[in-house]
Image (cartoon, rainbow, N blue to C red):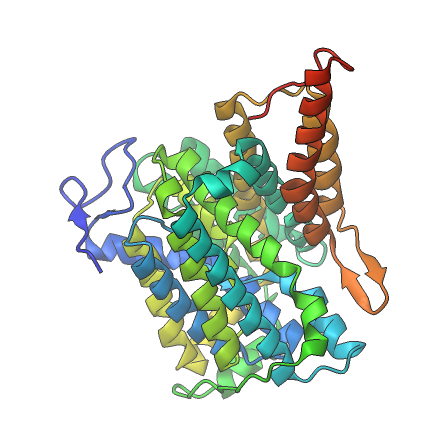
Amino acid sequence: MAVWTVHGSGRRPLSGAMVAADERVSWPLTVGFGVQHLLAMFGTTTLVPLLTGFPVTTTLLLSGVGTLLFLVLTRNRVPGYLGASTAFVVPLSTAAGQGGATPAALLGGIMVVGLLLVAVGVAVKALGVRLLESAMPPVVTGAVVLMIGLSLAPQSVSSFDNQPVPAALTLGVVVLLLVLGRGMAGRTAVLVGVLAGWAYAAVAGQLDDARVTALVEASWVGLPQLIAPQVHIAVMPFVLPLVIVLVAEHVGHLKAVAAVSGRNLDPHVGDALIGGGLATALSGASGGSALGNHAPNVGVLAATRVYSTAACAVAAGAAVLLSFSPKLAALIATIPMSVLGGATLVLFGLLAMVGVRIWAGAGVDFTDPVNLVVLGTSVIAGVGDLTLSLGELRITGIVWGSVGIVFGYPLLRALADARARTGVTPGSAGSGT
């Protein structure tokens, strides 16, 4: 892995400046920024394996290893963290509940999806990034980013129901520091907000008793449980559509980071897809959940303006260490979901606005009926979690939304342009951006 150059003096980020992907501040500060990424990914990355029946510490281990692999393959040019993908929860649960798939068979499906994602990445590298740009222009990637940010909103909002005070406290601290904080105060807003909400919940006796008991009983050192996969054809119809979702997530992540950092990351799309695919395949081959670029971590990048891959590597290393220490993992697990919800409410909002920023930067024409109809319908399907059943197969809103945007837009764009060229509907060609 390439050596990071020191940003400024290294003691703190320069006022108002962006810390680039290949830069770092002092290691103590880098660790602090890495902890913010760790907190942003922890809730979902531990919840998804619980919902799908996989060992939590194994997913933690593979998310850390997968992130490090991703950073190496993208040559330290693409900051991000690969956490457990929520898009797999419903398809895997359906395959297990209705199809009778075993955990090993589910892992085989995850592994195959990862390998297919690698194949897409290889095709992009071989044929050029224009292959993907033709199918996913800014109008599409902006919609994917917006849909992902908005579709995650219910997770944050629902966390306010049981414990509104720590959630509101966390939210308030993060917002105030991001808006009014200067220097390090603004850049560490997520960390300070989570610590404030966590401390309040502990003093007010609002920590979950079962998690506190698990913390007391957890051992300091333990080995993650590894599970061998089994490939079964019956599982594939449930998981193969998720290849599209992962492609959309990874490309949307690159476009989002490029939009907020001002750097062109298109040359690294193929490497990112290969890195993400290998990480998911490795996770599925070892007993972990499917991995994707984690939306809250993109929000952390936008909020802190620290795009250093060193901070992402610190978070990945910490996840690996936690996977071998049930005690430390249990400690972080005592952070109430309401506290994480208060922080992610801001981060998901920032991510959604990055999608709008991609549209604005590309000059997307919203008087064009193709843009309005396809994007509006697909985003609503994703945000509303439109779940339809085709026999035993249940397809969730994020899949419908991604398919509608990635495949529906180019098709209708081509039809509209063809009609415009024949003069049937003058002026309907609109913007193809």
Q: Is residue 311 left or right of residue 302?
A: left
When asked about the image quadrant of residue 321, the answer is bottom left
Instruction: Give percent across and percent down for residue 19.
Output: 27, 41
Residue 203 visible to an observer of this rendering:
no
The quadrant of the picture occupied by the N terminus is bottom left
- On screen, 185 above or below 370? below
Q: Is residue 95 left or right of residue 46?
A: right
Q: Quadrant of the C terminus?
A: top right
Horizontal side of residue 46 vs 92, given as left or right:
left
Could you tell me which residue is drawn at 40 percent across and 60 percent down?
275
Instruction: State the residue at coordinates (42%, 59%).
Output: 274
Q: Quadrant of residue 34 in the image?
A: bottom left
Looking at the image, the residue that sits furthest to the left is 9
Residue 49 is situated, as x and y percent measured from the top left of the image, at 59, 73
Q: Position of residue 208 (x, y in %)?
A: 61, 71
Which residue is at the front of the view, 6 or 280? Answer: 280
Please state which of residues 423 and 156 is positioned toward the viewer in this rendering: 423
Q: What x and y, as percent, mark residue 402?
A: 65, 47
Q: Can residue 344 be seen? A: yes
Q: Image point 66% across, 41% down: which residue?
A: 405
Q: Nearer the viewer, residue 4 or 427?
A: 427
